[in-house]
Amino acid sequence: MSFVICHLSFVICHLSFVICHLLFVICHLLFVICHLLFVICHLSFVICHLSFVLCPLSFVLWCLGIGNWELGIENRELGTVNSQQSTVKR
């Protein structure tokens, strides 16, 4: 009888260890997931912060005439399209 009680207590102890280990694994996975979410949120915050810095800076550069090369390329492309259309119409 004492052997059965001892064996049962060993089984219960082993099961509690397995449950504890599973809880530890779950907690560790949750920690990893939370850490990844924190990293993603931090990166999005950095990107938003950079956009708040770069948008006014690009506007200032555009106002100073430094950032007009993009508009110039678009205008040149539109100009070539318009000149091609005008030659087709002729």
Image: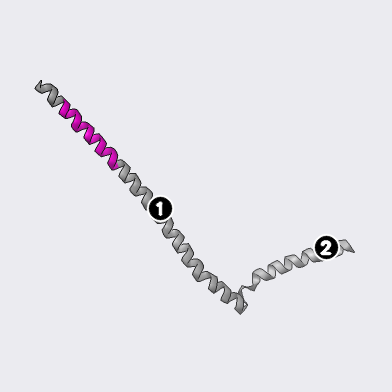
Between 10 and 73, the one lying in front of the other is 10
Q: Amino acid at mark 2?
A: Gln
Instruction: Determine the image quadrant of residue 39.
Output: bottom left
Residue at the farthest bottom position: 64
Say which residue label 1 marks.
37
Amino acid type of the residue tagged 1 in the rendering: Leu
Q: Which quadrant does the N terminus fall into?
A: top left
The furthest residue to the top: 1
Pointer 2 local density, CA inside 10 Å: few below 14, some 14–19, many at least 20? few
Give yes or no for contact between labels 2 and 1 (Cβ–Cβ under 8 Å). Answer: no
Magenta residues? 8-24
Give SS at disc 2.
helix
Residue that carries the numbered disc 2 in the rendered image: 85
In this rendered view, identify the residue nearer to me: 36 or 13: 13
Residue furthest left in the image? 2
Q: Quadrant of residue 15?
A: top left
Describe the element under mark 1 as helix, strand or loop: helix
The answer to whether residue 58 is magenta is: no
Residue under the point 65% across and 68% down = 70
Instruction: Please provide percent x and percent y for residue 65.
Output: 63, 77
Q: Is residue 75 left or right of residue 63?
A: right
Predominant SS along the magenta part: helix
